[in-house]
Amino acid sequence: MTLTGTAAFLSTLQSGMTPGTPLGQLFAVLVAVGAVVLVGRLVLRVAWRLVTVAALVVGVLLLVSMVAPGLL
């Protein structure tokens, strides 16, 4: 589902088109949880890359400090 489709779907949910039944409320909650999971996946993807880059930089600095102790 594209971002535009998701926004249109959520605006439909907010406009009161869903029934006030427990099943309709459950559906709205499941859609909200799905959106949180998708956003979380994107955030974790960026965080994982940052952690990987930081580990590489620290590893290189550690290696340089071991090879040439007076350099750093």
Image (cartoon, grey):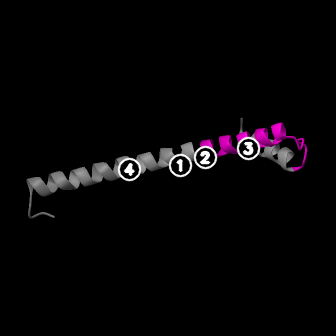
Quadrant of the frame with the N terminus = top right
Q: Is residue 33 left or right of residue 19?
A: left
Q: Is residue 33 left or right of residue 68?
A: right
Q: Is residue 11 left or right of residue 45?
A: right
**Residue 29 disc label:** 3
- Spatial distance from mark 2 to mark 1, Cα to Cα? 6 Å
Precedes in sequence: disc 2 or disc 4: 2
Q: Which residue is mark 4?
A: 51
Mark 3 Cα shell of 10 Å, populated few (<14), some (14-19), many (≥20)? few
Precedes in sequence: disc 3 or disc 2: 3
Q: Is residue 33 magenta?
A: yes
Residue 48 on image: x %, y %: 43, 46
Identify residue type, mark 3.
Val
Q: Which residue is mark 1?
A: 43
- Spatial distance from mark 3 to mark 2, Cα to Cα? 15 Å
Q: Which residue is mark 2?
A: 39
Precedes in sequence: disc 3 or disc 1: 3
Contact between labelled residues 1 and 2, with CB atoms less than 8 Å apart = yes
- Spatial distance from mark 1 to mark 4, Cα to Cα? 12 Å
Q: Which residues are magenta?
A: 15-38
- Spatial distance from mark 4 to mark 3, Cα to Cα? 32 Å
Identify residue type, mark 4.
Val
Quadrant of the frame with the C terminus = bottom left
Residue 70 on image: x %, y %: 8, 64
